[in-house]
Amino acid sequence: MIPAPSKCIDRNCKHWQGYMPSPINERSILRGLEPTEEFCTAFPDGIPEEITYGTNDHTKPFPGDHGIQFEEATETTE
């Protein structure tokens, strides 16, 4: 089961890439979820929970973000 949409999806971050399998962890067990982890360009090994479900909107540098912060995705018309 995929968890409820994160703030990264709700805010339409252009760097969000999807879900990947992750090891069973306390977060997934407490939520009764299959072990999945969201990832993006900034956090290829998994987005920290305080960004995906917490209060950090990632508009400022965050440890481990490879210099990439939130940017809203824009649609292009051709």
Image (tube, rainbow, N blue to C red):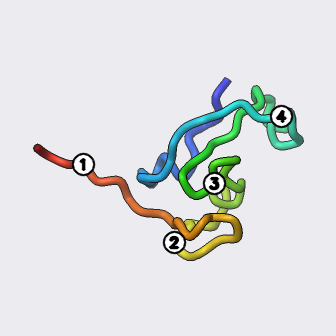
Please identify the residue farthest to the bottom as the structure is shown. 60
Q: Are marks 2 and 4 in contact (CB under 8 Å)?
A: no
Give the residue drawn at x 63%, y 42%: 38
Measured in 3D between alpha carbons, the distance from the residue under mark 1 to the one under mark 2, in whole angstroms, is: 20 Å
Q: Earlier in the sequence, mark 4 or mark 1?
A: 4
Image position of 75 (left or right of 30): left
Q: Secondary structure at mark 2?
A: loop
Task: Please determine whether, in this image, residue 58 is positioned above or below residue 21.
Answer: below
- Crowding around mark 3 (Cα neighbors within 10 Å: few <14, some 14 to 19, many 20+) is some
Give the percent coordinates (x, y) of residue 2. Answer: 64, 29
Between 38 and 66, which is closer to the camera in this rendering? 66
Measured in 3D between alpha carbons, the distance from the residue under mark 3 to the one under mark 1, in whole angstroms, is: 23 Å
Q: Secondary structure at mark 1?
A: loop
Please identify the residue farthest to the front as the structure is shown. 66
Between 59 and 63, which is closer to the camera in this rendering? 63
Amino acid type of disc 3? Phe
According to the picture, the residue beneath numbered tag 1 turns out to be 75
Give the percent coordinates (x, y) of residue 8. Answer: 53, 52
Picture quarter with the C terminus: top left
Image position of 19 (left or right of 77): right
Q: Secondary structure at mark 3?
A: loop
Q: Earlier in the sequence, mark 2 or mark 4?
A: 4
Amino acid type of disc 2? Thr
- Answer with the quarter of the image where residue 60 lies: bottom right
Q: Earlier in the sequence, mark 1 or mark 2?
A: 2
Image position of 22 (left or right of 2): right
